[in-house]
Image: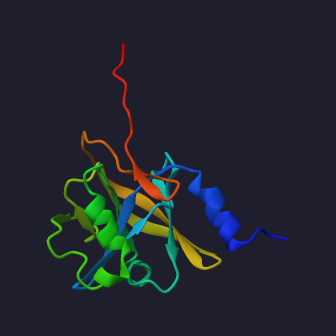
Amino acid sequence: MAIGEDEFRHSLAAWPSGVTVLTSRSGDRIHGMTVSDFSGASLSPPLVAVCCQLGSITTDLIAESDCFGVNVLAADQVEISNRFASKKYEHVRFETVPYTVGLTGSPLLEGAVVNLDCKVVSTYAAGDHVIYLGQVESSEVHDRQPLVYWKGGYREMRIEEDK
C-alpha cells in the first residue's frame, strides 16, 4: 500500500531542488508555471524531463505546441517564482517579466541561470501529472547563483571559493 499524500509531500520536502519556470506558446497564447520536478534525462541526445500537473494551462499549451522552455531561476528571482506559482496571477504572469522567444517559440525568461528551449519527444501519463521528455534545441547558461527550494522555503547557497 502506497504512502499518503501528506507523508509523500513531507518526504519530498527533504530534497533540495532548483526552481524552474516552465513556459510554452501555442499560436499567440503564452503561459508558464513554477515547477521543481525537472531533471536531465540523457546526454546523447540531450534530453530533459519535466513533470506537469494535468489540467494546467501550461500543460495544455505544451500538449498543443509540442515545445517548452525550462528557465532555471536565479536567486534574485523569488518574485517571479511566486508569480508563476500563484493562481492569483494566472492570466497576467508575463506582465512585467522580460523574455525572449526561443527557436521553438517558447518564452525564455531573462535573468535566469539557464534557459533551455525544448521540443517534446515523448509524453508519459503519471497519476495526476504528465511527464514530458524534451530534446534540448538550444541552451543559454549565465553566471548567476540559482534559486533553491528546500523544506518549504527558498534557501541561499553558501559557495566557498576554490582553494
The number of numbered discs placed on residues in the rendered structure image is 0
Quarter-of-image position of residue 138: bottom left
133 lies above or below 28? above
Could you tell me which quadrant the C terminus lies in? top left
Quarter-of-image position of residue 126: bottom right
- Name the side, left or right, on which 98 lies relative to 38: left
Q: Identify the residue at image location x=47%, y=55%.
A: 47
Between 54 and 120, the residue placed more toward the observer is: 54
Residue 83 percent across, percent down from the top left: 29, 71
Between 114 and 161, the residue placed more toward the observer is: 161
- Name the side, left or right, on which 41 lies relative to 116: right
Q: Identify the residue at image location x=38%, y=79%.
A: 58
The answer to whether one can see residue 111 in this image is yes
Q: Identify the residue at image location x=79%, y=69%.
A: 2
- Name the side, left or right, on which 86 lies relative to 100: right
Residue 69 percent across, percent down from the top left: 33, 65
Indicate how the structure is coloured in the image: rainbow
Residue 45 percent across, percent down from the top left: 48, 51
The answer to whether one can see residue 102 in this image is no
Q: Identify the residue at image location x=49%, y=73%.
A: 52
68 lies above or below 25? above
Q: Residue furthest right?
A: 1
Between 122 and 2, the residue placed more toward the observer is: 2
Could you tell me which quadrant the N terminus lies in? bottom right
Residue 33 percent across, percent down from the top left: 37, 72
